[in-house]
Amino acid sequence: MPHPSAMERLVVHVGRLAAQGSSVLRPLPRLADALVELDAVEARTQCSVWNMQREIRLPVVRLATHLDARSRSRQVEERTIYPVARARTRPLVTTFEPAMRLAPVDMPLLVADERDVVLGLAARDGDVFAWACDDPEVAEPASRAFLETWKAARSWEEAGLRPPLAPRRFHVALGMADGLSDREIAETLGVSPRTVAVEVRAVLDWLGARNRGHGIAMLVGAA
């Protein structure tokens, strides 16, 4: 009989702690709580952020883009894992997570500096089922579980995902996903509507979309 993986052992361990109501785990019952915690973790991280998630949601994409920019300015190591099926429905993922790999995700998990842990992140109707922890009792097995999964994961290039967009084109794509007009995107970016129109056309070509509506549906994962 095969030995359980590091991730399987972590899931059992965390489930036991949660069932016991252990003070080692700090509940994050709402999406706002989770986002505040992620912001605080990023601000004190010095060396590494390891992140594996099941879902790729645009609000989290925006926060991740902001936090990643801050982390990269400090040369923090980033490693991110998503399931391949989810990554295929979110064409922008390679742009905001160029160091991403693809693998099954048994439990959402973020480990910063092998010390701060946010795990079990699952959003539904604005509610989040997650915990934060900085106790070695969780941080050490969480780090082992992530590294084991990372080693077995494959690159997004191997999976045939779309290559990253240039920064301005990426922000144009986000504006499209928000339903903004070319003029509104232009005002946001400080460029001309004509420039935005050119970028929109390039985004649609990159997506292989039939038209703008189809492209927006692809960006938000509805197509």
Image (tube, rainbow, N blue to C red):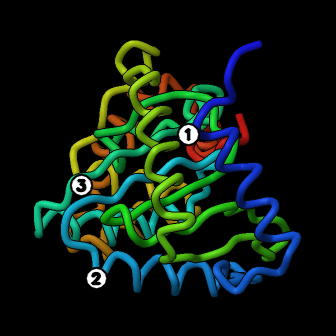
Is disc 2 placed on a helix, strand or loop?
helix
Q: Which residue is mark 3?
A: 168
Q: Nearer the viewer, residue 7 or 220?
A: 7
Q: From what the image shows, is residue 178 above or below residue 101? A: below
Q: Which residue is mark 1?
A: 90
- Residue in the picture at 55% in, 28% down: 103
Q: From what the image shows, is residue 13 above or below residue 147? A: below
Q: Nearer the viewer, residue 199 or 153?
A: 153
Residue 133 located left or right of residue 200? right
Question: Circle 1: is it few (<14), some (14-19), or many (20+) Cα within 10 Å?
Answer: many
Is disc 1 placed on a helix, strand or loop?
loop
Q: From what the image shows, is residue 222 above or below residue 210? A: below
The numbered mark at residue 44 is: 2
- Residue in the picture at 51% in, 83% down: 37
- Residue 172 figure quarter: bottom left
Of labels 2 and 3, the one closer to you: 2
The amino acid on which the numbered mark 2 sits, given as a three-letter code, is Arg
Q: Nearer the viewer, residue 10 or 33?
A: 10
Q: Quadrant of the N terminus?
A: top right
The amino acid on which the numbered mark 1 sits, given as a three-letter code, is Arg
